[in-house]
Structure formats: structure tokens, C-alpha cells
Image: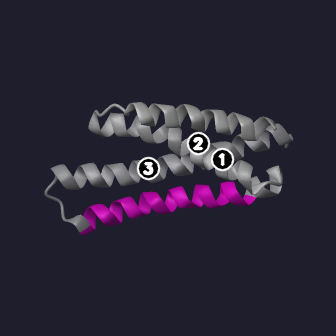
Amino acid sequence: MKEIYLKIIIIAMLFLGESLAIFAEMTAAKTYSISDKPALHIFLLMLIVILLAEAFLILGYMFGFSTFKNIWVISVASITSILIMEPILAYTFFNQLPTKGAVVGFVLGVLGFISAMTY
């Protein structure tokens, strides 16, 4: 497989893993606040999603380090995926816009990701 495709797949695995984890966290928070389901029931359902998310993250880190040869590139990709997805999911679940500080953090995160991937 060409190296560029492998790098794209690795970043996608990290992005999917972080996104699923955030999805599970926010789903649990919202469901618990508006539902009469027992907390343990919500927790166990979201634990299954978290386990799937963690599988993607572990694979992303394993293959990422062996491909990029630098753990910091993988860390930046992981953190940047959180910076991108957390505001999107927060707005989707809770209809709350990010604050000015969150927008600045997002922009700096994207710049950091671009910097880590190009230098």
C-alpha cells in the first residue's frame, strides 16, 4: 500500500476513534439528563461504544508510530481530531455554540496539526 494512503487511513482511524469516544460521552450525558433509564444501563451501552472507539485509537497509535516514526505527529492528529469534533458534537447534542476561546483553540489546533504534518 502506498505510504500516503496508509497515513490517511491512520489519521482516519484516530479521527473515528476520538469521534466515537466523544459521541459516547455526550450521548451518555444527554440521555442521563433527559431519560428515566437507569444510569448503569446508559453506562453499559456507552461502554460498548467506547470499547470500539478505543480499538480504533489503539490501532491508530500502533500503525501510526510505525508509519510516521514520530509519536508527536500521532498525538497532534489525535488532539486535533478532538478539537474538531468536540465543538461539532457539542452543538449537535446540546445546541450550544463554542465560546470565543474555543474558536481560538480550534484555529490553533488546526495550525498545529498542519505544522506537525508538514515540518
- Residue depicted at 51% across the width and 41% down the height: 83
The residue mark sitting in front, 2 or 3, is 2
Residue picked out by circle 3: 22
x, y percent for residue 95? 28, 33
Q: Nearer the viewer, residue 92 or 37?
A: 92
Residue picked out by circle 1: 76
Coloration mode: one colour
Task: Quadrant for the C terminus, please.
Answer: top right
Tag 3: amino acid:
Ile
How packed mark 1 is, by other alpha carbons closer than 10 Å (few <14, some 14-19, many 20 or more), is some
How packed mark 3 is, by other alpha carbons closer than 10 Å (few <14, some 14-19, many 20 or more), is many
Q: Nearer the viewer, residue 2 or 108?
A: 108
How packed mark 2 is, by other alpha carbons closer than 10 Å (few <14, some 14-19, many 20 or more), is many
- Residue depicted at 24% across the width and 51% down the height: 31
The magenta stretch spans which residues? Answer: 40-62
Tag 2: amino acid:
Thr
x, y percent for residue 112? 66, 38
x, y percent for residue 47? 40, 64
